[in-house]
Amino acid sequence: MLTEQTVREVVGALEDPFLHKTLAETEGLVEVSIKEEKQHVSVKVALAVLNTPEQMAFQMKVVEVLKEAGASTVGIRFQELPKETLEKFRGAATASEAQDILSPLSKVQFISIASGKGGVGKSTVSVNLAVALARAGKKVGLIDADIYGFSIPDMMGIRDLPKVEDGIIQPVDRFGVKVISMGFFVEDNAPVVWRGPMLGKVLDQFFRDVAWGDLDYLILDLPPGTGDVALDIHQMLPASKEIVVTTPHPTAAFVAARAGAMALQTDHEILGVIENMAWFQSEVSNQKEYVFGSGGGPRLAEELRTELLGQIPLGQPDWNEEDFAPSVYAKNHPIGEIYHEVAQKVIEKTEA
């Protein structure tokens, strides 16, 4: 006859597919129930990450070992491991476990930059936030995940291509930021006409097959809207914080709210809102001109119950032909100083 002790032994010996620790070690076998007359076994299991293909494979293993032990039927419920448990194993992670940025044991902070629509300056925000964090002494990576509309290499003035060493892609370092983009892998600015599954594979490579090294932050420039690529990224990440970019225009803010809602629906935290193109300040009159209206950023932050991290005015970076980067603001540029303030807020909110 199947006993609770036997169930705990056989299921407890299985490894969490993300932590690579047994359920006995993680205390991941939360409940066991046996109906003796029918030999029906119900278990509740806690894993590091839910709703993944790995969870489905793990579920089949649980059924297999329990039926081999004598169960006629098996019922399984899942829940996430408590944050305290993950922190305990994160502190004891091996070097290889900590370097796998998609592992729950990784200490990398993922920050996704999202928008409801294109043309609001999301990529400009991604680039300058990444550079500002690097200037603040943080180890930063940047993934240009806008697969169809990649622009990061051009915006940062990157001329080099990534190298491949022993099958691992070496990201390009620019302004202290490690960068990877679809733009490195297409010729002559060719359009990307792939379908969803192929794009998912590319994104997986960007996470798993790139030598990111030891990072504090990995910034992701998401495609606009709430389509397949953005959803795939939300599902790939063990945890992510999101910044939503909008212009002051009411319609732009209305559309951006969808991107914020998607983050909440996929259990990702909204870090704040950035209002881009907030105003134009005339050098002649020194007056602020609200070209795209006003109020969209604060209203969006209020709707999403989050903080307005910053308002970025319209203005062109100072171009330097020697070190050309058409979208990167210098540290002492007035807009560069605003990005520095935003970066400091991000650091305070993520390291609290």
Image: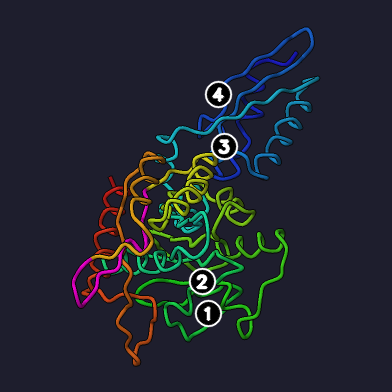
Q: Residue at x 38, y 61 (%)?
A: 292
Alpha-carbon span between mark 3 and mark 1: 38 Å
Amino acid type, mark 1: Pro
In this rendered view, identify the residue nearer to me: 93 or 222: 222
Which residue range is magenta in the image?
Answer: 272-287
Q: Which residue is mark 3?
A: 22
Question: Is residue 237 rendered magenta in the image?
Answer: no
Query: Foreground mark, 2 or 1?
Result: 2
- The amino acid marked with disc number 4 is Val
Looking at the picture, which amino acid does disc 2 mark? Ile
Tag 4 near tag 2, CB within 8 Å: no
Label 4 belongs to which residue? Answer: 30
Q: Earlier in the sequence, mark 2 or mark 1?
A: 1
Quadrant occupied by the N terminus: top right
Residue 278 drawn in magenta: yes
Which of the pair 285/328 is nearer the observer? 285
Q: CA distance from mark 3 to mark 4?
A: 13 Å
In the rendered view, how is the structure colored?
rainbow
Residue visible at 59% across and 38% down in the picture: 50
**Front: mark 3 or 2:** 2
Q: Amino acid at mark 3?
A: Thr
Q: Position of residue 122 (x, y in %)?
A: 45, 63
- Separation of residues labelled 4 and 2 (CA atoms): 41 Å
